[in-house]
Image: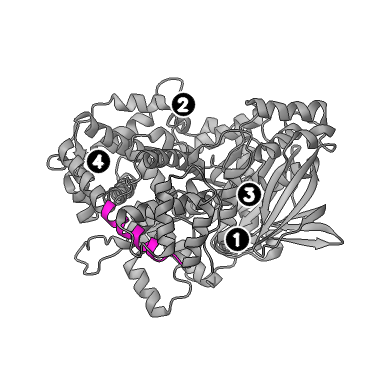
Amino acid sequence: MITLEEFHQDFLQSILSDADSRGLMKPQAFFENVCEELISTGDLTKNYENADYSKKGLEAHGFDYDEERKILSLLVHQFFQSDEIETLTKQHIETKFRRLESFYIKSVNGLHSKMEETSEAHNMAYQIYQWHEDDKIEKIKLIVFTDGKATRSLLEMPSKNLDGIKVEFRVIDINYLYQIYLSENTNGIFEVQTDLSYLLVNSDSDEYKSYLSCISGDELAKIYDDFGQKLFEQNVRTFLQFRGNVNKGLRNTIESAPTMFFAYNNGITATATSVEVENNRIKKIHNLQIVNGGQTTSAIYAAVKNLKQDVSRVSVQMKLSVVKDKEKQSDFVSKVSEYANTQNKINKSDFFSNNPFHKEFKSHSKRVFAPASDGAQLRTHWFYERVRGEYLNEQAYLTPAKKRQFQLEHPKSQVLDKTFLSKSENTWLQKPSIVSRGAQYSFKEFADTVTNILEKDNLAITEKYFKDAICHAILFKNVEKMVSKSSWYDGGFRSQTVTYSIAYLAYYIDQQKKFLDFNKIWNMQSLPHILILALEAITQNIYQAITNPPEGHANISQYCKKDFCWDLIKKMNIQISLEGLLINKEEEQYSKKRAKKEKRLDTGIEIQTFIIQLKLNEKLKLLEYYKKDNEISPMKIDILQKYCLGSLPLPSEKQSKILYELYSKAIEEGFCIRVD
């Protein structure tokens, strides 16, 4: 098990590496990393923005606004960047909260009118002012981020009222971040206090227990008010407001027939890592996840908050399954989400966490060596971190010598997580307005794109695809660093400048019906000089364009989220040279065909190996399963039967593929084949 001290060291190294490779100030890298962690846990929404502001008595580093719950979160950090874990004192905390509260008060009184309109801080102050004027703030959270450790008494600070608005104080310290890491690699980090009667469903399974219960509308609304998106981390859908017929039906039932809600509604399906029972009642639920029924929960909450309705007479049935094994819990959630009689259509991309893309991309990251660069002799890997904390977790039980070897072969600067990958990929696909909307929007778009690609071509994620994607990431990181160090850069809107600049480069090349030769970037693991010169010209022009928006678009952050902004950027005529860096369509197509041919060969060998290694009991279970299936062709059943009886001791590649398809189909249909 990784200790808190080990986690702190790894976390600090991540910040320093991120800052160096992307050209960020260390506190800014710290802020962004913590925000991404808090989005994953539901503590922040996908709408968070960074915006540094520091004057005498005032300080803020960013904000977040939860539109559904009308919660404004103001963010500030205390980054010690020390090798040892520092103690966050009472004076530290009180000073930070006092400055943050003063910034809020000044903002609602028009602070933005005294600020530079093109700054990110102006956007933050103006948004706060506008939300306050429109009466859209029902709760304020003042949050301090720190890489230090606060005592428990300082973490539990009482709330207060400010002009009739509830103000809560939170400290996110290194221990909280450590608990997030543990939750993603062991068990959950939060518990829901409740008092529910239940019926334990008899089950022979040792893997999970199921409880049937009923929860009142007001209690469900309170739980959502307390925990927000934490309850839906593994839910494949998002709430669709009251737009669809189903949601209108929910609203109408709550309004006119609340006592009939139980009869009309399917209720919610939830999972937990454990429950605490006392006197035949459920008192605590650890790591509660609502995997089906998110709309039901949000509809009841919206009825309370937006329509001011009494939902105490609303009763919601709840099916709660306790799945102790973390790995099995993920699979269980996926199956529940997929098989449940859902009320609105779920896109296939919503199951992206189980998409074969991750397995294939991870396989390439383990197998493909990056060329040695800068005179280094050691070849390294790019580490694909599908789950946060995976890089650290792989080192958990290594000896000190093996750990040093692992870190040399997988340097911190070459760790690539799926969120950053989605940004760099969407940027090269010329979707800068999507990237500017935030990491979660970008990731959803990336999931859609990859799902569509794999539906059309299951061989699409080749070694060439992997290398090109790494080159996109190298390009993105280098442009981030370039913008930060440029003499013309006044600060602010760096992320928007980066994504629009690279997207413009991709568009410029497309217009010439050419392709960038990514082999040159891959072999160097950096950018060729002529490409750097081209990007220096592009970034300066793009920065000037987006920070001087057309009339009626004074809010630069919002302007960059619009397709209209991208349409204007594409009309720019920036003079650049890419001599020696472009290849024609025929060369690109040849490279793709060759990569698919190589992958087809590798895949065929892997499938044969998998089929040969199946145990006899597993083969017989598979045959028994398909004997009852009239839709499977007799030819396929014949191959399976011969293989089970031993008359086909070594199936050919083609036969192995048929057997693998039968195996995969049975698994997808929920049949358990594997035996211990």
Three-letter residue code for mark 4: Glu
- Residue 537 placement (x, y as % from top left): 23, 37
Residue at 78%, 30% (x, y): give it: 254
Residue 69 seen in the figure? yes
In the image, what residue type sits under mark 2? Ala
Q: Give the magenta-colored segment's residue range.
A: 600-615
> Residue 536, labelled with which disc?
4
Residue 222 in view in this figure: no
Question: Which of the marked residues, 4 or 3, is nearer the chain's N terminus?
Answer: 3
Foreground: disc 3 or disc 2: 3
Label 4 Cα crowd, 10 Å radius (few <14 / some 14-19 / many 20+): some
Image quadrant where one finds the C terminus: bottom right
Disc 2 marks which residue?
A: 554
Above/below status of 452 relative to 135: below
Q: Please tell me which residue is depicted at 60% across the width and 36% down the height of the picture.
A: 107
**SS at badge 2:** loop
Rounded to the nearest angstrom, the CA distance separating label 4 from label 3 is 42 Å
Q: What kind of element bears circle 4?
A: helix
Q: Amino acid at mark 1?
A: Tyr
Q: Are marks 1 and 4 in contact (CB under 8 Å)?
A: no
Q: Which residue is mark 1?
A: 176
Of the image marks 1 and 3, the number of the one nearer the N terminus: 1
> Farthest right residue?
279
Judging depth in this view, the residue of 49 and 514 nearest the camera is: 514
